Image (cartoon, grey):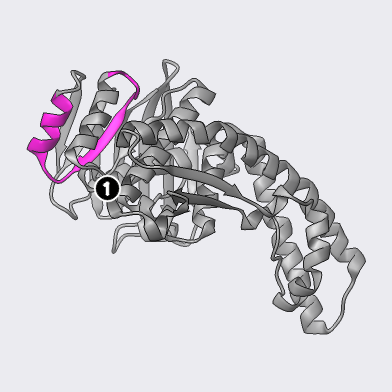
Amino acid sequence: MYLKNLSLLNYKNIAEANYEFDPKINCFTGKNGVGKTNVLDAIYHLAYGKSYFNPLAVQNIKHGEDFFVIDGTFDKDNRNEQIVCSLKKGMKKVLKRNGKIYDKFSEHVGFIPLVIISPSDSDLITEGSETRRKFIDSVISQLDPAYLQELINYQKVVAQRNALLKYFALNHTFDKDTLSIYNEQLDELGHSLFEKRKRFLEDFIPIFNKHHQSITDSAEDVSLRYDSHLHNKRLLDLFDESLQRDRVLQYTSVGIHKDDLLFEIEGHPIKKFGSQGQQKSFLIALKLAQFEFIKKQSGVLPILLFDDIFDKLDETRVAKIVQMIDDKVFGQIFISDTHPERTENIVKETHQSYTLFNL
């Protein structure tokens, strides 16, 4: 599978652009601010129906304009698949496949397997648990539509339970029977999601360890650990224990929406004890593991977006990535960098076809 062409209209700082892509390697070079990352984000947008960098859709419209359009044609299983994503101010975003509008964006997730590696991935280390949960959910959802629907349903019920807790507090009332309806729904959905996350990480963590050892020549002892309230108790029991706290807080304080993925080096949080270089290696290994996991599970080589490649890696580590390209580990890859000559020297070593776009 690969992206054949891309057309952009009023997307971020790009008024209009058209690209024809190489099936293997495509490089965007130029000074900071010219739009290299925006092109990669547009490709991400076609795969996920949203921006990787800006969750507020309307802010992806070029300043002074009323709409944006992203139009791309993918070759998948030797068939052309046209994906169009567009948004007009004041209206809902529209996502179309071969001219047919999706009723739900969730129906599209996983159709275009894609992994992005970006400097902003550092949020996975520096931000709170929600960012790491989204990473887990994103990988599983690409391969399991039922998981994504269960997750959406779980989040809706949590919102309803939270609204009920607020209602109780405002009206100085309490109805245990009504609350128990939500508790039972969350127990069933939460147990299923927990088991799927647990199975995913049992498969994923060894892949992560392999990539990290390769990148660092096994020089560092790192680990991923799944932290969840459900490891030891069912959710119904946890709700009973947290009832008084939830009534005071007016929200649901336990459940799989509080899960976390712990990143550690030498048994300590990498956020506090890892150097910048160690953190970068950790994140690269995490994303390469995501790539390999999706490839194994789907049987399709995901598209790989490598944003600002030298921000993430020193030249030794870049050489290791290049070797993986040469060994045909990757399918189609998109790279952005500020130095055209440096980038071209790297991709020449892969002995693969490539196209260079100097923005």
**The image quarter in which residue 172 lies:** bottom right
Q: Nearer the viewer, residue 160 or 306?
A: 306
Residue at screen point 10% across, 37% down: 342
Residue 339 is inside the magenta segment? yes
Image vertical order of residue 274 relative to residue 159, above or below: above
Q: Which residue is mark 1?
A: 37
Magenta stretch bounds: 327-348
Q: Determine whether 101 is above or below 57 in the image.
A: above
Asked whether, in this view, residue 258 is left or right of residue 9, the answer is right
Identified at 28% across, 34% down, the residue is 334
Classify residue 320 by image quadrant: top left
Q: Is residue 7 left or right of residue 157?
A: left
Residue 321, image x, y percentages: 27, 31
For the residue marked with disc 1, what is the amino acid? Thr
Residue 349 shown left or right of residue 277 in the figure: left
Front position in the image: 45 or 195: 195
Can residue 179 be seen here? The reply is yes
Residue 238 or residue 153, whichever sits in front = 238
Image quarter hosting the C terminus:
top left
Callout 1 secondary element? helix
Residue 106 on image: x %, y %: 58, 42
